Image (cartoon, helix red, strand yellow):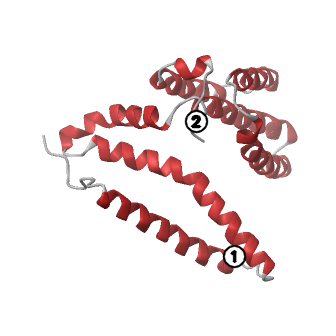
Amino acid sequence: MIASKNSSYLARIKPGWKFGALLVLSISLYLIDSWQLLLLSFILSIVLLLSAKVGFKQLRMPLMSLAMILSVVFVLLGLQTDWGNAIVSVLRLLTMCLFAYSVSLTTSFDAMLELFQQVASPLRFIGANPAQIALGLSMTIRFIPELKKVYLEVSEAQHARGLGNNPLAVSVPLVIRSLKIADETAEALDARGYDSAPYRR
């Protein structure tokens, strides 16, 4: 999820600082084994997300999907290991996701693209084009919700035909439509004169 417009204080912080802090927090969470400390971190992540002035409509579907996935993870870990370990793992993952939502929903697409380009800039010394790499990463993030939307549409259509339990009936149309989106995007880039040639110093 990437923000289009956000007026919170988090939106005024430079993307590099936000993503750097997110990286440090994510590593720190994996070093914590106490569920009490993880619960405290989870509460802090909720407070941070609420302070980001993000509308509930933007968070409803992602949070519902996250809750479903983590519910499965909790049950599987609880059965395979123990329930204490399952609680710790789910709290850790949930906290990381909420922190990530706070960062991504207060960072514009352009700012994220610029950050990716800065991070990839050292690769120019081996002949790579940082701008192309940044665009590729940004478009990957941008199309995650688009592909999720396509999956839901295909799944609903096949379910209406009585094929909802057939993985092949869902995966084949999903791949075809995904390739069509990729082809349309490539044509749009070509039409705008985007240079796909290797970067030259």
- Image quadrant holding the C terminus, namely top left
Q: From this viewpoint, is residue 164 visible?
A: no
**Residue 51 percent coordinates (x, y):** 71, 20
Q: Residue at x 85, y 51 (%)?
A: 79
Which numbered mark, 2 or 1, is in the foreground of this view? 2
Q: Quadrant of residue 30?
A: top right
* Sequence order check, earlier mark of 2 and 1: 2
**Residue 100 percent coordinates (x, y):** 62, 33
**Residue 179 percent coordinates (x, y):** 48, 70
Q: From this viewpoint, is residue 140 visible?
A: yes
Depth check: 106 or 41 in front? 106
Depth check: 179 or 97 in front? 179
Q: Quadrant of residue 59?
A: top right
Specify the amino acid type for callout 1.
Answer: Pro
Numbered label attached to residue 3: 2
**Residue 155 percent coordinates (x, y):** 72, 70
Badge 1 crowding class, 10 Å Cα cut-off, few under 14, some 14 to 19, many 20 or more, is: few
Q: Residue at x 57, y 27 (%)?
A: 22
Numbered label attached to residue 95: none
Specify the amino acid type for callout 2.
Answer: Ala
Q: Residue furthest left?
A: 201
Badge 2 crowding class, 10 Å Cα cut-off, few under 14, some 14 to 19, many 20 or more, is: some
Tag 1 secondary structure: helix
Q: Quadrant of residue 165?
A: bottom right
Q: Is 104 placed above or below 71 here?
A: above
Tag 2 secondary structure: loop
Q: Which residue is mark 1?
A: 167
Depth check: 48 or 180 in front? 180
- Image quadrant holding the N terminus, namely top right
